[in-house]
Amino acid sequence: MNFDQSRTLLEIVNHMLLRHPELAPNVELLSKRMQGKGFVAALSAEVEIAFGLFKSQPRLVIDIGGNVGDYRAPRKTPDHASF
């Protein structure tokens, strides 16, 4: 999708929301999910999902994000450790 297509899509969404403002929460939720925001999972599930994105198992994966918890606390799963 190039810039012009993105702009057109945003214009369509904006036009729709002007006519149907009650759909705004649904559009916001869809937008967050497409960006990976608001996803809550156990660390072991998050690790499995991340590793599923790679063709071969990486030696290091860095996950930047989140807004809950002590970011400095090391966490461990049976096969992985995070620091």
Image (cartoon, rainbow, N blue to C red):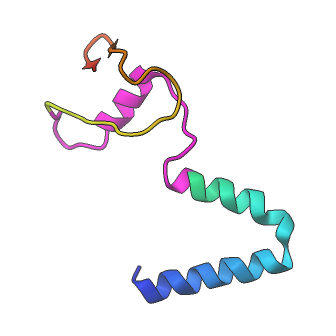
Residue visible at 16% across and 38% down in the picture: 56
How many circles with numbers are drawn on the protein? 0
Q: Which quarter of the rendered picture does the N terminus lie within?
A: bottom left
**27 displayed left or right of 45:** right
Q: Which residues are magenta?
A: 33-58
Q: Whole-percent x and y of residue 69?
A: 50, 22
* Residue depicted at 37% across the width and 15% down the height: 73
Residue 78: percent from the left, percent from the top?
30, 10
Residue 25 position by quadrant:
bottom right
Q: Is residue 17 left or right of residue 78?
A: right
Q: Is residue 12 above or below residue 77?
A: below
The part of the image, by quadrant, that contains residue 81 is top left
User: Residue 32 at what x, y percent from top left?
Assistant: 58, 53
> Residue 3: percent from the left, percent from the top?
42, 84
Q: Quadrant of residue 64?
A: top left
Q: Quadrant of the C terminus?
A: top left
Q: In front: 27, or 53? A: 27
7 left or right, relative to 76: right
Q: Tell me, yes or no, whether the highlighted magenta stretch contains residue 41.
A: yes
Observer-nearest of 72 and 57: 72
Q: Residue, x 35% and y 29% (percent of image)?
A: 48
Q: Residue at x 67, y 58 (%)?
A: 28
Q: Eyeballing the image, is 75 above or below 55?
A: above
Q: Is residue 66 above or below residue 82?
A: below
